[in-house]
Image (cartoon, rainbow, N blue to C red):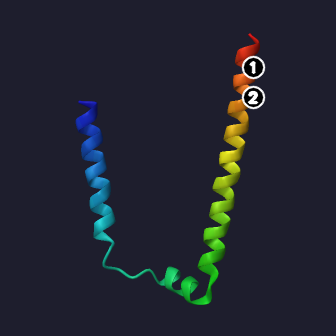
Amino acid sequence: MKKLTFLLLMLLSFTTVFAHADQPVEMADAMRSSGLIYVVVAVIAIIFTGLAIFLFSIDRRLKKIENEK
């Protein structure tokens, strides 16, 4: 039952994505034309890299604590 519910939820989420494909995104076009889209992508990449480094460091600390016990 859980798998069927999850499958239906995923199918409905993809349907909404395709429903908005015909409309142009004005903000993205404006940012792309002025070059600001690269700043947005760079900031998002920096945030995800920082989160990944933070999570790996926490994982390493937890492994060290687990090995001590």
Q: Is residue 52 left or right of residue 22?
A: right
Name the spot of residue 65 as percent of width and height, x first. Answer: 75, 19
Kind of residue at disc 1 = Ile
Image quadrant in which you'd find residue 34? bottom right
Residue at 44% from the left image edge and 80% from the top image edge: 25
**61 left or right of 42 in image:** right
Q: Nearer the viewer, residue 59 or 28?
A: 59
Q: Which residue is mark 1?
A: 65
The Cα atoms of the two marked residues, 1 and 2, are separated by 6 Å
> Vertically, is 68 above or below 51?
above
The residue carrying pointer 2 sits among few (fewer than 14), some (14 to 19) or many (20 or more) residues within 10 Å by Cα, namely few
Q: Secondary structure at mark 2?
A: helix
Sort mark 1 into few (<14), some (14-19) or many (20+) by Cα contacts within 10 Å.
few
Q: Position of residue 3 (x, y in %)?
A: 26, 34
Q: Is residue 5 above or below residue 45?
A: above
Q: Is 48 placed left or right of 5 in the picture?
A: right
Q: Total number of numbered labels?
A: 2
Question: What is the quadrant of residue 42 in the picture?
Answer: bottom right
**In the rendered structure, are the residues bearing label 1 and label 2 in contact, judged by CB atoms less than 8 Å apart?**
yes
The C terminus lies in which quarter of the figure? Answer: top right
Amino acid at the residue labelled 2? Arg
- In the displayed image of the protein, which residue is found farthest to the bottom? 33
* Spot occupied by residue 21 in the image (x, y as percentages of width and height): 32, 74
Q: Is residue 54 above or below residue 20?
A: above
The front one of 59 and 26 is 59
Give the residue displayed 63% in from the left and 63% down from the top. Answer: 44
The kind of secondary structure element at disc 1 is helix
Residue corresponding to mark 2? 61
Could you tell me which residue is drawn at 56 percent across and 89 percent down?
33
